[in-house]
Amino acid sequence: MFHDYAKVLIFALAGAGLVVLGMFLGGLLRPKRDRDAPGLEPYECGEEPIGSAWFRFDIRYYTVALVYIVFAVEIAFLFPWARVLKTAFADPSIGGVAFLEGVLFLAILALGLAYVWRKGDLDWVKELSKNRPDGSPDLTETTEDQD
Amino acid sequence: MYELLLSTAIALAVVLAFITVAAMFFVYAERKVAGWIQHRVGPNRTGGFAGWAQSIADSIKLLLKEDLILRGADRRLFQLAPAVVMASAFALFVVLPFGPGLIVADVDLGVFLILAIASVTTIGVIMAGWGSYNKWSVYGAMREAAQVASYEIPLGLSLMPPILYFGTFSLKAATEAQTGSFGMGWYLFSDAFWIAIPSFLLFFVAALAENKRAPFDLPEAESELVAGFHTEYSGIRFSFFFLEEYAAMFVFSAVGAALWLGGWNFPGIHLLEPGSTLLLVLATASFVLKAFFLVFIMMWVRWTVPRLRIDQVMTLGYKYLTPLSMAMALIAAGWEYVKHLGAQA
């Protein structure tokens, strides 16, 4: 069994090695670049780039990552359950309890999904309506009393 | 020990040859399929007959192109990214059962290992996007992170029904369980076919998103992000991302074929003598053809369905596929319990 996992590692290393080999072969064949030659600016469709490319991106990506971590960890726990369920049924001391536990686990998972759904974290485009579920202030109102 | 190393080296050489030849074929096939669907010819000059040498010419050209690393780029991330991506693409092939006895290593984690290694690709893509020092690339990387993260949940859950049915993670064991009496005991035709069909569709859609294939190709959306995370990659370094994409497409199609479509089994396999060369050849051909067929459907989808918007991608992933795949996992577990109760009575 140890050897099997060693093979996974060997294959991964070989994949990385292929990149090194490809770069080496390409290095023999391709033209050498003059270090001061132009063309090392980021491509922005012909415009000169303004500011750093490492800009601050939307917080929504962070929320998605958080939601993912919760679910991914729980699914990782669900996999062994799915694997042994049949053998658990056959064991009279466990039997239907194995099924019930899976139902319970998935129910908690569904509850978590329902929570983030209700909280609006699954909506990519946030609605600025008056009745936000978390009771936060309505942002559309302030712009209206200008005229 | 010596024999083990030798067998690993042979397996490695075979997989290396398979990945490069298959990827070249897929690149050519993709363009031909696109041409066919859009009523054009596609590549038809290079090499004479039907432009068969197009991919070979392309690879030679990519090798000859100069290698660009932007001023200001994170050189280490930029150079390491293709290696990370390729390492994961290669490691995915270890657990694929190509034919009876034709498997690099029947690791007991099987599909779970594939899920785990496939997510490493995402890290490579994020490294590439962030290290490029280009705004388009950073956008592509962030989209990749958000998209793959959302679709990994339905992908994992849609694998539950077959795992529950076979009671194993090993793709080899799952394939062997699908031989049936005529080589047609496929999961798709089993007593649980009404669970298998929707879960297969869920798996397929989630796999499309996981491999950033159209209509989920937001990380590299040409019309919005130039080329997304690989905008600043040139020459041979760029080609590794493509090699990985096609390798991953094959792997996910192969997982679909092994778990739902009977793997290497084909009607009439029971007539052949076990262990014979003919059986080995036909079984391997059957497995590879099934996987190629699914890859063809992925190409078909690409040229048929328009790209989704990022909010649509999120809605589909979290609000439709996730609850549906959770329900399918629950139903599949319930069906196993019902069958168990029925067998007891």
Image (cartoon, coloured by chain):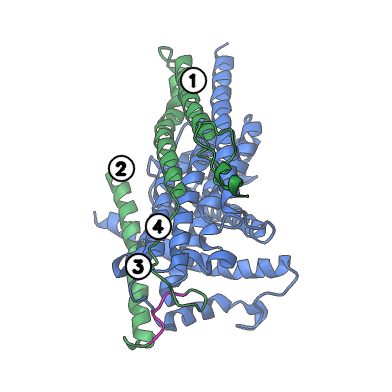
Chain colours: A green, B blue
For the image shown, how many numbered marks are present on the structure? 4
Q: Badge 2 is on which residue?
A: A1
Residue B293, picture quadrant = bottom right
Above or below, B39 against A56 in this view is: below
Residue B339, picture quadrant = top right
- Look at the image and tell me in which quarter the C terminus of chain B lies: top right
Say what amino acid the circle numbered 4 marks: Arg
User: Looking at the image, is mark 4 or mark 1 earlier in the sequence?
Assistant: 4
Q: Say if residue B204 shows up in the picture.
A: no
Q: Badge 3 is on which residue?
A: B78
Magenta stretch in the rendered image: A38-43
User: Looking at the image, is mark 1 or mark 2 earlier in the sequence?
Assistant: 2
- Extreme residue toward the left, this view: B1
Residues at marks 3 and 1 touching, judged by CB atoms closer than 8 Å: no
Secondary structure of residue under mark 3: helix
Label 3 vs label 1, nearer the camera: 3
Say what amino acid the circle numbered 3 marks: Phe
